[in-house]
Amino acid sequence: MPADLPRRSTDVVVAGGGPVGLYLAVLLLQAGVSVQVLEQRPSRSSHSRAIGVHPPALESLAQAGIGDAMIREGVRITHGEARSAGRTVARLDFAAASDRYPFVLTLPQVRTEHLLEERLRALDPGALVRGSKVESFDDLGSSVRVYGTSEGQPFMTEAVLLVAADGARSGIRSALGTRWSARDLPDTYVMGDYPDGTGDGALAVLYLEPEGIVESFPLPGGLRRWVAHSGALPPEVTAAGLAQLVHRRTGHRLDVAGNSMLSAFGVRIGRAHHLVSGRTVLVGDAAHQISPIGGQGMNLGWLDAAAVAPLIAASLHGKPMGRALQDFERRRRRGAVVASAQARANMVLGRPLPQRAMALRNAGLERMFQVPALGGAVARRFTMQ
Ligand SMILES: Cc1cc2nc3c(=O)[nH]c(=O)nc-3n(C[C@H](O)[C@H](O)[C@H](O)COP(=O)(O)OP(=O)(O)OC[C@H]3O[C@@H](n4cnc5c(N)ncnc54)[C@H](O)[C@@H]3O)c2cc1C
């Protein structure tokens, strides 16, 4: 058999080699479970999405052996600030939110996936097969057969379990007929990475302005990510257009020639009503899609994986599962509801508001953040504690 075709049998097939599928595969291999990750893309996507990694996920990534490497490459954000009309309205101290990881880390998703893939290949060089698309599957009761194509050639892999980590548009979730409640929210954003000339160092800054929020986060390599609420999805995003918008709302002039990433996105949220069906488990965005604002989707998926990996390992080693899978489903659906509510609150905070209403709202925020216990509670919510 050519080396790049999937194996004919394995303990677990993970469909999707995004951050959640790769992470789950690492945990399973570490627990002595054989894994085949099938990823339809021949190479990693360079499109930048997630950057924020929160303390609970850092704990889990340390268990997967890549926490230190991520921290070495990333930027540690210990504080955040909300500004409006040139004034500081609120300060957030992330340092107090966790003893072990007193910061939120930023690292572009493409680097995170690179480190996960490197770790996976170190554990089993053949675990990830790129260019392999899962087309269908057959739950036989005592095993599951997964069918697909790899570089144009059909393949079949038989496993004890199929994990769908195939993203928000999960084909496996659709094939299972799992109920998926989804809707589009009215918010749209444009974002881009530019050389950091703000002087804000490792500070995360939210500019609460009448035209809509601008978020500004430090990135490795002396860059800063700017995310701005926009009235609608623009037909074309340009480095100069986003720079103008940022300048109008915040006063910062961005280095347009140094722009290295541009994107625009709308917000769709969705939740699967079941995560476990027969021999199939949904994790990550396949199980729940939340707003990118607040930066929790990937972290949430990692926490799914960290919760299910020991259950899978125990069941494959012959331990009775009892109600463990139902508990997993209940707890992870609840985790998604909480994270989604936090992301919605962040979005509401960033919507355009008439000047007067914004001044009143910001005065309320200022008063609230003068109460240390409230500020601490908000910081803990922001960092998924
Ligand atoms: C603009 C933006 C910013 C974000 N910022 C953050 C942030 O700061 N922090 C955070 O935690 N989250 C953030 N997110 C969310 C985060 O990107 C997602 O939650 C995360 O990528 C989900 O990972 P996943 O592995 O579940 O799915 P995906 O990343 O979607 O990966 C799924 C993989 O499955 C593959 N696949 C699909 N179908 C098949 C098939 N049939 N066969 C084989 N392979 C298949 C796909 O090619 C893909 O590689 C952001 C999202 C966006 C859009």
Image: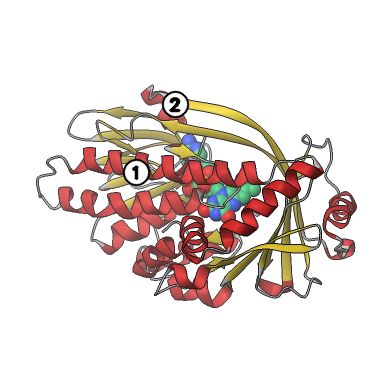
Residue 384 is tagged as: none
Above or below: residue 193 compared with residue 36: below
Report the coloring of the rendering.
secondary structure
Q: Amino acid type of disc 2? A: Trp
Give the total of numbered labels. Answer: 2
Where residue 265 appears, x then y in whole percent? 69, 41
203 vs 197, left or right, is: left
Which residue has dot 1 on it? 332
Give amino acid for label 1: Arg
Q: Position of residue 239 (x, y in %)?
A: 85, 54
Q: Residue at x 29, y 56 (%)?
A: 28
Q: Considering depth in this image, is 25 or 210 the residue closer to the camera?
A: 210
Provide residue 257's location: percent of width, then percent of height.
89, 63
Residue 135 visible in the current orientation: no
- Helix, strand or loop status at disc 2: strand
Choose between 139 and 223: the one closer to the eye: 223
Above or below, 198 against 130 in this view is below
Q: Position of residue 326 (x, y in %)?
A: 22, 37
Q: Which badge, 1 or 2, is on the more N-terminal residue?
A: 2
Residue 362 appears in the rendering: yes
Q: Residues within 10 Å of mark 1 (few under 14, many from 20)?
A: many
Q: Is residue 10 left or right of residue 369?
A: left
Image quadrant occupied by the C terminus: bottom left
- Residue 161 occupies which quadrant of the picture? top left
Real-space CA distance between mark 1 and mark 2, rounded to the nearest whole angstrom: 15 Å
Query: Mark 2 highlights which residue?
Result: 180
